[in-house]
Image: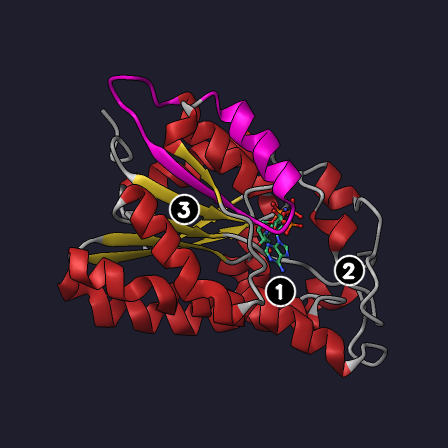
Amino acid sequence: MSVFTQKVIWITGASSGIGEAIALELSRNANEAHPIKLVLSARRADELERVARQTGLPAANVLVLPMDVTDFGAFSAHVERVRQHFGRIDYLFLNAGISQRSTVAETDFSVYQRLMDVNFFGTIALTKAVLPLMLAQRSGHLVVTSSVAGKLGVKYRSGYCASKHALHGFYDALRAETHSAGLHVTIVCPGYIRTPISLQALNATGQVHGKMDANQEKGMAPDVFTRRLLKAVSRKKEEVYIGGPETFGIYLKRFLPGLLSRILRNREGA
Ligand SMILES: NC(=O)c1ccc[n+]([C@@H]2O[C@H](COP(=O)([O-])OP(=O)(O)OC[C@H]3O[C@@H](n4cnc5c(N)ncnc54)[C@H](OP(=O)(O)O)[C@@H]3O)[C@@H](O)[C@H]2O)c1
């Protein structure tokens, strides 16, 4: 029996990449004796339906709930829908996000606003909408997808890095405030994971980058990433770094910041 047995688990960004892999990995470990209930959210309803089918879970155990994480005003209604459907929310994987490929000098200000809306404000607004229910339950676990770029600054991702850094301040504070109320917060910093994230990354004018970057292509498989993530979540880890050698950058930043700075400024390519 796993910690996820009988639990209601809401995943944002479930139509693709890491969110999809979380849904499939959780379902792989579930069965009649150890059921789970999933809520799958993202904008593309057809992709969510595809993932719901691939989970192989009984239809009654999956709620497909399409939503745009920048539609902040709709969140209370979404939470109420989940509460009415499944009665509670045990885990919320706050995973929806978009990346960036453009220098500070060339990037339109509107691109920064979009990155903050999707990656930061969308994440904290949904958290605030779910929080009253988790506090009333006196239990709940928030799992936030940050990035290695949430711990250091890399070229062409200034807004992405800023949006992910902001998550750490917010969720460290929330963890401290809600620990005694029985809530848990895990922040995960993935390195390069093999997903289509670079295809949807925004360029200087807010258009999609549209290219699969080499680092992503060579990255860790999403199912391998997810198995490590779920182990960390079940152990209630506060912060975890999962990926290849790029995750060592976080330790260099802490212990040898000058060396990391030299490496990052000499690094070429997206
Ligand atoms: N892949 C990596 O190497 C890597 C590394 C570090 C961190 N991350 C983080 O991991 C998370 C998942 O990314 P991924 O790699 O799995 O990329 P992905 O395959 O592109 O998935 C991104 C997900 O976010 C959803 N999304 C984007 N904008 C949204 C919006 N406005 N409203 C609702 N949902 C939205 C997308 O669904 P729709 O388009 O259907 O809305 C999709 O399901 C992101 O937070 C990303 O920053 C990824």
- At a point 19% along the width and 53% down the height, the residue shown is 139
Q: Earlier in the sequence, mark 2 or mark 1?
A: 1
Q: Is residue 34 magenta?
A: yes
Residue nearest the observer in this picture, 67 or 154: 67
Q: CA distance from mark 1 to mark 3?
A: 36 Å
Q: Quadrant of the N terminus?
A: top left
Q: Position of residue 177 (x, y in %)?
A: 23, 72
The residue identified by callout 2 is: 267
Q: Position of residue 79 (x, y in %)?
A: 37, 57
Give the crowd class for mark 2: few <14, some 14-19, many >=20 residues within 10 Å.
Answer: few
Question: Which amino acid is tagged 2?
Answer: Arg
**SS class, disc 3:** strand
Question: Which amino acid is tagged 1?
Answer: Leu
Q: Earlier in the sequence, mark 1 or mark 3?
A: 3
Q: Earlier in the sequence, mark 2 or mark 3?
A: 3
- At a point 67% along the width and 72% down the height, the residue shown is 114
- At a point 43% along the width and 27% down the height, the residue shown is 59
Question: Which amino acid is tagged 3?
Answer: Trp
Among the 4 quarters of the image, the one containing residue 14:
top right
The residue identified by callout 3 is: 10
**SS class, disc 2:** loop
Look at the picture and state if 90 lies above or below 181.
above
Residue 260 disc label: 1
The response on whether ligand 1 sits within 8 Å of label 1 is no
In this image, 139 relative to 143: left or right? left
In this image, 135 relative to 243: left or right? left
Residue nearest the observer in this picture, 92 or 216: 92
Q: Position of residue 10 (x, y in %)?
A: 41, 46
Q: Quadrant of the C terminus?
A: bottom right
Q: Which residues are magenta?
A: 29-56
Q: Is residue 167 magenta?
A: no
